[in-house]
Image (cartoon, rainbow, N blue to C red):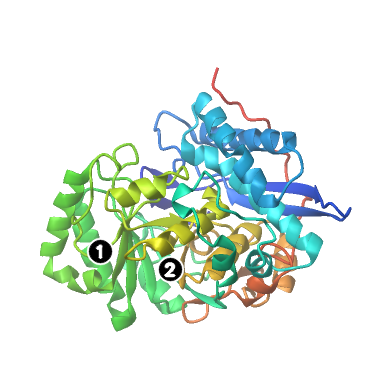
Amino acid sequence: MRMPFRFGVTTTTGGLQLVVQVRIELSDGRAATGWSAEALSAKWFDKNPALTDAQNHHQLRRSVELAAEAYLALPAGSAFSFFTRSYRDQMSAAEAEGLNPLIASFGPAMLDRAVLDALCRALGVSFPAAMKANLAGMAVTELTPELAGFDLSGFLAAQVPQQSLALRHTVGLADPLTAADQHSPIGDGLPETLQEVVRHYRGSHYKLKISGDIPADLARLRAITAVLAPVGTGLRVTLDGNEQFRDAAALTEFWTAFERESALAPLRQALICLEQPIHRDRAFEVPVSGITGDLPVIIDESDGSLEATPRARALGYRGVSTKVCKGFYKSILNAARLSLWEKPGLLSAEDLTCEPGTALQQDLALVGFLGLGHVEKNAHHFIDGFGPRAEDAAFLAAHPELYHREGERVRLRVTAGQLDTSGVLAAHGFGAAQAPRAEGLSPAPRALWPQA
């Protein structure tokens, strides 16, 4: 990584990406290979400080292993049915091995994306075309009883994919805001401070991490508000608590102090939502209704199971995040659920440092298909381009609308704060015409989990 990324309980300075390859065969004999990719994000799925980053990686690989065993044991069926037929067994098997629901969901999420990618490639269709025609075979099942009678195929067919999305830039807890905050400038041509980000990308959407330390948060938010002032009246902001408030009382204390700050009035007017303020272990203990007034509070890390969103709604939460690492089927089912709420719920597109290439493009394809308008993205800021040079050249050739070359590096193309998703939505496959390069990848070791 080009600079450290501090969020929640951790500061990330490097990491691993898992790439999954799946081969499918259709009933008519056609076969195809599909791919998915995702960062093995330590201290997000499981924030237990007693676990090392390596142990977090083993947890996530074990989830994929469990899902692969389950999927391979099933008879032929629709793409979606592999998710539904294995769901309860996957969650139970993961729980038996000490893996929380968020980790349990990771394995199927990886396989489902790769299977859908293969299906799109086999049929020569794009992700939006496949979903609008419901080629995955999505259906209402006993796993989502609140959707009984809902026309899911009609819902999919009615989606209007967006050809561009506003990039919502992540401001980590350790990010320098101005040159005065910099200790060791990188000097690689990319913006480093928030002030430089505003000038360079000319974006209007930002995501601000908060720590749960009220005096420190208020001071940092005041400084951020001043830096974002040039954005003007088009400024739109989300706050991310990353589970840093111990309970609803702590959140109330923060919000009361936040509302008293006159210097933060421009920020309050720009707010879209507050994401996962309370730790997942206590987020569903008491209602959050009214704590933040009319501002929606949504869940993210609490969204481990299919039951989470209905539970959250009952407690006053007004939406949920979408991340492909939690499962794209879950995101679509949640979108359907939210459309039925008396006051339509908020589905907010968040990022798990989706690296350029397959991971980024699959996430953009899902968000673009659902027409969510803006999406958090941060890998382009904390990571400089791709890894293998052969891969960056191939993705640039396949998607020149999304990437561009600056010197020797291929980087994300951001135009006036917008990402062009037209090529991602048109590609025959799940968001990418180009497949990852297998050469140079190291085989994933067997997961050393459960711990001895």
In three-dimensional space, the C-alpha distance between marks 1 and 2, rounded to whole angstroms, equals 18 Å
Examine the image and state in which quarter residue 376 appears: bottom left
Q: In the rendered view, would you say 90 is above or below 21?
A: above
Q: Is residue 316 left or right of residue 86?
A: left
SS state under label 2: strand
Q: Nearer the viewer, residue 135 or 25?
A: 135
Do we see residue 435 in this rendering?
Answer: no
Q: Which circle's residue, 1 or 2, is located before the other in the chain?
A: 2
Q: Is residue 30 left or right of residue 368?
A: right
Q: Which residue is mark 2?
A: 168
Name the residue: 73% across, 71% down.
Answer: 398
Q: Judge depth for marks 1 and 2 and give the one in front.
A: 1
Q: How many dots with numbers?
A: 2
Q: Is residue 241 left or right of residue 357?
A: left
Pointers 1 and 2 in contact (C-beta within 8 Å) = no
Q: Give the class, few, some or many, for how many residues have Cα within 10 Å of label 2's Cα (few <14, many ≥20).
A: many
Examine the image and state in which quarter residue 159 appears: bottom right
Q: Which residue is mark 1?
A: 295
Residue 248 is situated, as x and y percent measured from the top left of the image, at 21, 45
Task: Say which amino acid is labelled 2.
Answer: Arg
Name the residue: 67% across, 57% down.
Answer: 136
Do we see residue 298 in this rendering?
Answer: yes
Residue 348 is situated, as x and y percent measured from the top left of the image, at 42, 62
Name the residue: 62% across, 38% down.
Answer: 86
Task: Say which amino acid is labelled 1.
Answer: Leu
Residue 125 is situated, as x and y percent measured from the top left of the image, at 74, 68
Name the residue: 50% across, 36% down.
Answer: 53
Q: Nearer the viewer, residue 39 or 73?
A: 73
Q: Which mark is residue 340?
A: none
